[in-house]
Amino acid sequence: MAELHPFFVHFPIALVMVASAFDAYAAVRNQVDLHKTAFILQIMAALAALPSAFSGNLAEIAVRSNEALAAAIAESLDRHTDMGNILVWLVIIFAVARVFAVLERKEWALSGWVFPSLALLLAVFTLGTGLAGGELSRNILEYFVGN
């Protein structure tokens, strides 16, 4: 399952990005239907984050079992692992908070700038985590090409 991490991880990344775009556009245009679309996409991202995190943790275990590899890429591995774990929790907390606000019928939950602003911050952190994953992949490749 660890080898499937690159497959699993791209789906929630795309969902977070698209959801934040829908939220931002909905806030600018004041269109509640687009906020609803973003809301559904964020719930899907939270659900898709679970297999991403699980497979990522398995991939980390596999990499750390090779001591020479783990030592060579320690900095990028730690950065991506830490950011990935934080991101999974942020995506889940964000989705749960929004579900709670919607169920409580808070008017601002599907309008305004509260969730779109948070969604944009989440998208920026998601992008940073993805870039850290790309750096980690390059470092792993460099290790194997050099050894």
Image (cartoon, grey):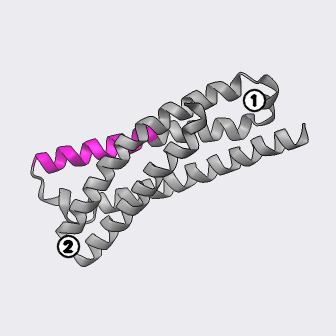
Q: Secondary structure at mark 1?
A: helix
Q: Residue shown at 56%/38% (left/top)?
A: 4
Q: Earlier in the sequence, mark 2 or mark 1?
A: 2
In magenta stretch: residue 96 = yes
Q: Decide if residue 48 is on the left or right side of residue 7.
A: left
The residue lying toward the viewer, choosing from 7 and 36, is 7
Which amino acid type is shown beneath numbered disc 1?
Ala
Q: Position of residue 144 (x, y in %)?
A: 83, 39
In the rendered image, which residue does mark 2 sit on? Answer: 31
Q: Decide if residue 69 is on the left or right side of residue 114.
A: right
In the rendered image, which residue does mark 1 sit on? Answer: 70
Question: Does residue 22 sit above or below 3 in this rendering?
Answer: below
Q: Residue furthest bottom?
A: 29
Q: Position of residue 84 (x, y in %)?
A: 53, 40
Number of numbered callouts drawn: 2
Span shown in magenta: 88-104
Question: Does residue 134 sit above or below 52 in this rendering?
Answer: below
Q: Residue shown at 62%/53% (left/top)?
A: 131
Q: Decide if residue 96 is on the left or right side of residue 87.
A: left
